[in-house]
Image (cartoon, rainbow, N blue to C red):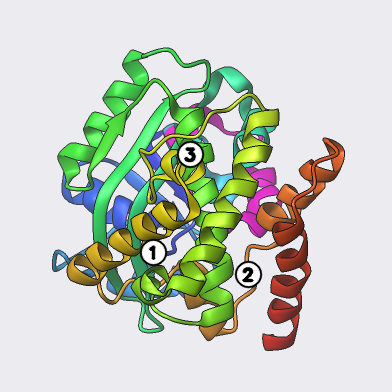
Amino acid sequence: MDKVDFAILGSGAIGSIIGAHLVRAGRNVVMLARGNRAQQIKQDGLCITGLVEFSQAVSVLTEPTSLRAADVLIMATKTQDSELALAPLRGASIGTAFSIQNGIMKNELLADCFGREKVLGSLADTSGELLPSGKIIFSRNANVYVGELDGSNSKRAQEIAGTINASGVRATSVVEIQRLEWSKFASWVGMMILSVTTRASTWKYLIDPGSALVLVRLVREMALLAAVHGVELSDRSVLPVAALCLNSEQEAVAAIQRAGNQLKSTSPGHRMSTLQDLEAGRALEVEETLGWVVRMAKQHNLSLPLLSSFYPLVAAIDRIRR
């Protein structure tokens, strides 16, 4: 395949939402997909429902080695698929690559594959759900952040964010992307754990005082790990993680409950992608997220008792459910 504007590696909810909007806006996009999902897209296109309603035909590649060149590669697979998914693309000419996956190690994997100078940091504060039928429920359109890993304000980050934003998926270029990636990860880790253990819609465990307290303590452990990596958490995240670490536990619990009540009002059906995977019998993102956290804590001689306990529990739930 000749050069495309955007190649999207992974055709789950968020990758499909971004891909569909970009194609609809006139961009040359190819989805790198496989198996049943590839067949769904070839037959029905990308079918988006929820915040917007449309179906969009799009090019699909089932053999990644056929991709010769792309101005932008967006990594949107589950984290456990990263290395295998990237391997066939090492020969492709990629202008810029970024990952909207969960976790922190994603940037290093992209840098190893394409060179660090081609990698942007990114995070998706955006929600969707892939249904068995192939339809995508687009449930939350907050922001996709992109930025240079060195903290500079580059033209390419501005142009990529502007293109995605103009297509209908909100996106912004930022200069503090690594801080925001860590802040989202601190929120995501705690919410992922609670989604697996409570199996409830997100707002429900955010407003419960007991689960909110556990979430506060998990975020505070994540802040310790961020600190040894030289990162100060920010309130520009799904949760105000910096404030959760500075205020009293009572104040922090109240802040999480406020976030839960807001989510109940705006997105009552929101469920973490981890819970979606659990209920569908799919593998959970454990080793590259919680496992990575525990390994890093051990490497830095950090005591993170809650995270160290929940990691084997979530891994056991993953094994038992499958």
- The C terminus lies in quadrant: bottom right
Quadrant of the rendered structure where residue 89 is? top right
Of discs 3 and 2, which sits in the foreground?
Answer: 3
Q: Amino acid at mark 3?
A: Leu
Q: Which residues are magenta?
A: 72-97
Spatial separation of the CA atoms under disc 1 and disc 3: 34 Å
Q: Where's residue 256, x and y in %? A: 38, 59
Q: Amino acid at mark 2?
A: Leu
Q: Which badge, 3 or 2, is on the more N-terminal residue?
A: 3
Q: Nearer the viewer, residue 297 or 304?
A: 304
Q: Kindly state the secondary structure of the residue where label 3 is placed.
A: helix
Q: Residue at x 39, y 50 (%)?
A: 239
Q: Which badge, 1 or 2, is on the more N-terminal residue?
A: 1
Dot 1 corresponds to which residue?
Answer: 13
Q: Where's residue 273, x and y in %? A: 47, 68
Q: Kindly state the secondary structure of the residue where label 1 is placed.
A: helix
Q: Residue at x 52, y 61 (%)?
A: 215
Q: Amino acid at mark 1?
A: Ala
Left or right: 172 in relation to 80: left
- Observer able to see residue 174: yes
Residue 76 drawn in magenta: yes
Left or right: 2 in relation to 77: left
Left or right: 38 in relation to 219: left
Dot 3 corresponds to which residue?
Answer: 246
- The relative height of residue 254 versus residue 83 in the rendered view (above or below) is below
Dot 2 corresponds to which residue?
Answer: 284
